[in-house]
Image (cartoon, rainbow, N blue to C red):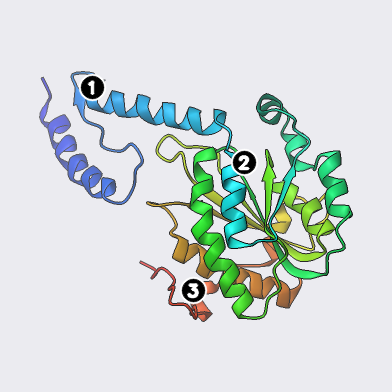
Amino acid sequence: MKNKEEASAEQQITPIAGRLKNHTNARVGLRRSGISISTDELLNFQLDFARARDAVQREIDETDVFQKLQAIDGRALLVYSAASSLQMYLQRPDLGRILSVESEAQLKARSSEKSDICIVLTGGLSSAAIHQAFPLIERLAAALQGEGTTVAPLVLAHRGRVAIGDPIGALLKAQLSLVLVGERPGMSSSNSLGAYLTYAPQPGKTDESRNCLSNIREGGLSVDEAVFTLLWLIRESIRLKLSGVQLKDRSRESLTLKDGAKPIADE
């Protein structure tokens, strides 16, 4: 039997956990049956684990994804990393950061003009996340072009990591690279998209030179919020000629989107 102190503590925790559950998908305030969690909670855990595993182990349908990119930008390009299989991609992260010999030659052969930004899409560690990217790309590219920012052809990089945007951006002669990548799945979010912005992309750049937005998904950072923040970061990165730890996100303080997206109000 519970003593009075244990019963009192449980009464205090339960309403707190209930309020938290309204704001997060994280596992807080799990129901219990005796000393174990309830069957419902156990089954939910197993389902989320299966979704996370599938997100990593299932490859994107590159033909379908590329066609959707072409619908946004008829100039879209399809390139491949040096990882020749999913197994190699998971075991050798370094190969996902560089282009295959054929794809590097493909981009070198292009007589591309200089551009302000190139946008690269890759499945990363969550094939489920890639579908979050299409509305974001469409809105972001339209907003950038409306402001006179030149956007290189959209790129789908198959089996790419974040750093694959460095050689792609350099070969496309872009001031900035923006890599949209499926994030490593969590147990309550298997479809999160990350956005990584790098000024003056070149092979060998490291993570402190990048700005990152993470958890772009329904229930996380919305497309409106992501577009708002990315537009501000892109403008400031081009103006200041830098990115990463030297560029702080102050988008909420000074900018209002022309197309109606608004920043999140600070709570």
The image position of residue 80, as x and y in percent, is: 74, 41
| Residue behind mark 2 | 62
Mark toward the start of the polypeptide (1 vs 2):
1
CB under 8 Å between callouts 3 and 1? no
The amino acid marked with disc number 2 is: Glu
In this picture, is 125 found above or below 167? above
> For the residues carrying marks 2 and 3, which lies nearer the camera in this image?
2
Mark toward the start of the polypeptide (3 vs 1):
1
Q: Residues within 10 Å of mark 1 (few under 14, many from 20)?
A: few
Q: Nearer the viewer, residue 186 or 6?
A: 186
The amino acid marked with disc number 3 is: Arg
Please tell me which residue is depicted at 78% across the width and 58% down the height of the picture.
169
| Residue behind mark 1 | 39
| Residue behind mark 3 | 252
Give the alpha-carbon distance from disc 2 to disc 3, as whole Å: 36 Å
> For the residues carrying marks 3 and 1, which lies nearer the camera in this image?
1
The image position of residue 34, as x and y in percent, is: 18, 19
Please tell me which residue is depicted at 78% across the width and 53% down the height of the picture.
168
* Mark 2, secondary structure of its residue: helix
Q: Residues within 10 Å of mark 2 (few under 14, many from 20)?
A: some
